[in-house]
Image (cartoon, rainbow, N blue to C red):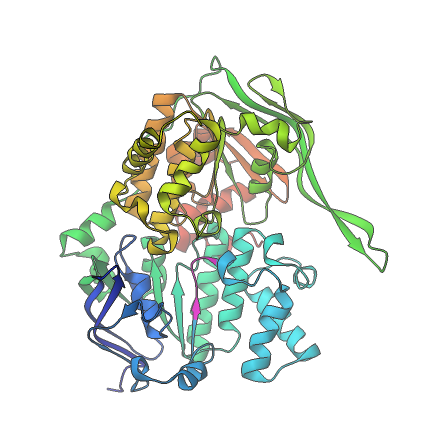
Amino acid sequence: MSDPLLSIRDLSVAFHQDGQENLAVNRVSFDIKRGESVALVGESGSGKSVTALSVLKLLPYPAASHPSGQVLFNGKDLLTANEPDLRDVRGNDVTMIFQEPMTSLNPLHTIERQIGEILGLHQGLFDNAARDRTLELLNQVGIRDPEQRLQSYPHQLSGGQRQRVMIAMALANRPDLLIADEPTTALDVTVQAQILKLLETLKSDHGMSMLFITHDLGIVRKISDRVCVMTQGKIVESGPTKEIFDSPKHDYTKHLLAAEPTGQPPKSDERSPIIVEGRDIKVWFPIKKGFLRRTAGYIKAVDGIDVTLRAGQTLGIVGESGSGKTTLGLALTRLISSKGKIAFVGKSIDSYSFSDMKPLRNEMQVVFQDPFGSLSPRMSISEIVAEGLRVHEPRLSPDERDHKVASVLEEVGLDASTRWRYPHEFSGGQRQRIAIARAMVLNPRFVMLDEPTSALDMSVQAQVVDLLRKLQRDHNLAYLFISHDLKVVRALANNVIVMRQGRVVEQGPSEQIFDAPQTDYTKALMAAAFDLEASSADIVSD
């Protein structure tokens, strides 16, 4: 038998802070053969990403250290390699897709420049050759109209589009090993299927190996040859994928496989008061061309949509990346300008300025898709969650404020004693729970939830769904729930709008949309979400 491409032996990772040492990874060992896919699964904070980052020595050294272990790539220990040798390996032999695309992409550079930089550095491709290869990569990962996206900046793309750009950058040099840290987190179900198929094709064509880190067990079953189940820094079970799914032995593995959002959404009640109402909402972005930058057309991100949200009810907004879901939510919360009528609790707010909206902000809260981008790295968790209280409830004493912060952190499943830490000290899933706590601490009447469970593992998704349902029931909250995870939408939303390219494709009660979809597009979405393998031939291209 040939030697493995990557061999992690007895790896430990410790973090040092305030004179204390915390062991995040405890003597982990596994191999990846050439052309093999290995999935590392477990809940947030289990040590998956820390293990992956250790392969390329991307942890914050010297705060992080390795008390034990080796990371052997092609027989060479990367933990003892010098920086020039590591630079030769990074981005060429081994590449990585990170979980947070907005913080991984340079906000000052266009997409063409960022992908072109990699091609120039590792392949010597410049100008037209680099542009042609960039377009080929963007086409491969499902970016619609790639020529128009070349000059876009990261903030001009949706979360899913940004993640696809990251995947294109990682695949640019046809690496021997691809480390994918939650690469489909921000992608809708149909594009997930496209990306997984693309990764499988590249693996087959180029003999590429993959270390796939995810909380989505459906993806694990689809793409991995072997699975390592991780919790509290240790691998508790490993083996062939089919064996792990069909005959799990460890209690933690059984817990993961059984975890899925369940329960019923609130029953529709037309007698409930209307909290938010929108009529003929339009958000058009001008396309400027030529030397004088004249408007040559418009991107119709939202094109004439009606919305009604009632107290105690949840409206789910679903559709592929770039369909206008988030833009519609931002328009309804008056975070971007729009045309059309918008009313909040019967009061017309479509003409309100930013300052006019300020007194209403405590009643209208948002949980954003990217928790790392929306949490200040310079503020502790206590300061982040308490910031809204300082603005909207200035009469609270410091002790009262701190009590509220501690209480809401416990409510979303975090240890209140961690509130003095900073965002970078938490996993992706933990950061999303912090973002939910920040919104809920003000007891709002309306909450826009933009992919609030996308960064969470399956068991925590179920907990958060139960938490959101309880908060809604206790406080009669109105939710606008934006998501590509249709299983979560089904568990929470009593009404659903299906969007594509800024327009409504289909809308109605949740049972109707999920059980008897009327349009081919909705049928393709449902098939991809609930039967990924059977639907791959019927996917609607983005």
Q: Main secondary structure of the magenta part?
A: loop
Residue 453 or 88: which is nearer the viewer?
88
Outermost top residue: 271
Q: Residue at x 37, y 37 (%)?
A: 437
Does the magenta-highlighted stretch encompass residue 99? yes
Quarter of the figure with the N terminus = bottom left
Q: Residue furthest right?
A: 292
Give the vertical position of 245 relative to 261 (above or below): below
Count the numbered circles shown. 0
Q: Which span is picked out in magenta?
A: 96-100
Residue in view at x 52 percent, y 52 percent: 159
Is the residue 104 above or below the residue 327 in the image?
below
The residue sitting at 45% across, 84% down in the picture is 88
* Looking at the image, residue 423 lies above or below residue 39: above
- Nearest the viewer among 56 and 518 is 56
Which of 542/184 is in front? 184
Q: Is residue 254 above or below residue 237?
A: above
Residue 246 inside the magenta-drawn segment: no
Report x, y in % for residue 462: 30, 40
